[in-house]
Image (tube, rainbow, N blue to C red):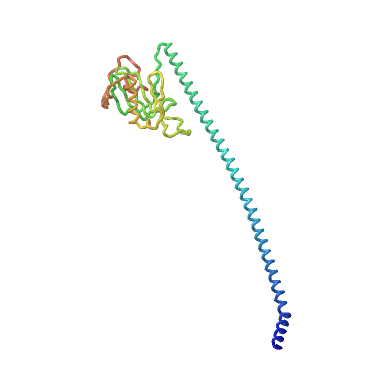
Amino acid sequence: MMLQNNLEHLECAWFRKWGSRSLENYGKRKKEDGQRKMESGQRKMESGQRKMESGQRKMKGGQGKMEGGQRKMKGGQGKMEGGQGKMEGGQRKGQHVGMLTELLQTKKRKWARKQGAAQMYFPLLKDARPVRRYRIGTYLATLLTDCVSAGHTQYAHVLIVFKEGIPQPCFAVASEVNQMRGLGLKESDSHFLGVFPGDMHHNLGASKEWADLEVFARKALELTAGHLAVTQTPEVLPASFTAPPAKVASPTQGKKWWQFWK
């Protein structure tokens, strides 16, 4: 009994000496841990605040870029509309020039009729290379290429048709170079197909096919036969063929029969 009391006395003495210190140290450590956790949480909160501010700045920057893109898009749309307006203006000017040209030609024809002369309208050439000659019923035709124009209109190929025995041309078909093809028009519209019945000009549309000599020749012969109401198939003439002399005197006599521009 006395031993037990002595042990309890010793335990109480130890606790008084060391236990209070342990509790004090324990509480102090807990307090320091809490302080550190609070500081860590505050740092995390500050980091989160900075990230939120950075996100807001990025959002504002993205919004600014989006607004800049919208302004650029509006500017591009304005330029596109301006370009379209210019193109339409150019087309209207071209139509106006075409109408003026047609009006001028009409006035020339009327004046020629008043003077008692026939006004003929055919491709103006300085020179060309003959490729092939044809007989189409009672008509003769020559296919020309490497044409050198004497006027504003440039020609790639020309089929010129004469009534046999008459030196003046009566019909022509031409592959005309599209002068507008470098101004935003499609490359597929590189050449016009023009028809010359004698006193006027008809444009049958644009296509890159008319740049091909053989494709042009087939279409030109088809148009010629249709215009002249000839049912016979065009006959290719030998290179040695010489046209018969003209029935009437003409300034073109003494020249090759197909060189109508000389």
Question: Residue 139 or 33: which is nearer the viewer?
Answer: 33
Residue 173 seen? yes
Task: Give the vertical position of 119 relative to 81 (above or below).
Answer: above
Residue 148 seen? no
**Residue at the extreme bottom of the image, as rendered:** 2
Question: Residue 185 or 147: which is nearer the viewer?
Answer: 185
Residue under the image location 72 percent in, 81 percent down:
12
Task: Give the vertical position of 69 relative to 3 (above or below).
Answer: above
Q: Position of residue 241 (x, y in %)?
A: 26, 24
**Residue at the extreme front of the image, as rendered:** 1
Residue under the image location 68 percent in, 66 percent down:
36
Quadrant holding the C terminus: top left
Question: Residue 120 or 201: which is nearer the viewer?
Answer: 201
Q: Position of residue 257 (x, y in %)?
A: 31, 21
Relative to residue 30, is residue 80 drawn left or right? left
Asked where in the image residue 214 lies, by quadrant, the reply is top left
Quadrant holding the N terminus: bottom right
Q: Position of residue 228 (x, y in %)?
A: 32, 19
Q: Position of residue 15 (x, y in %)?
A: 71, 80
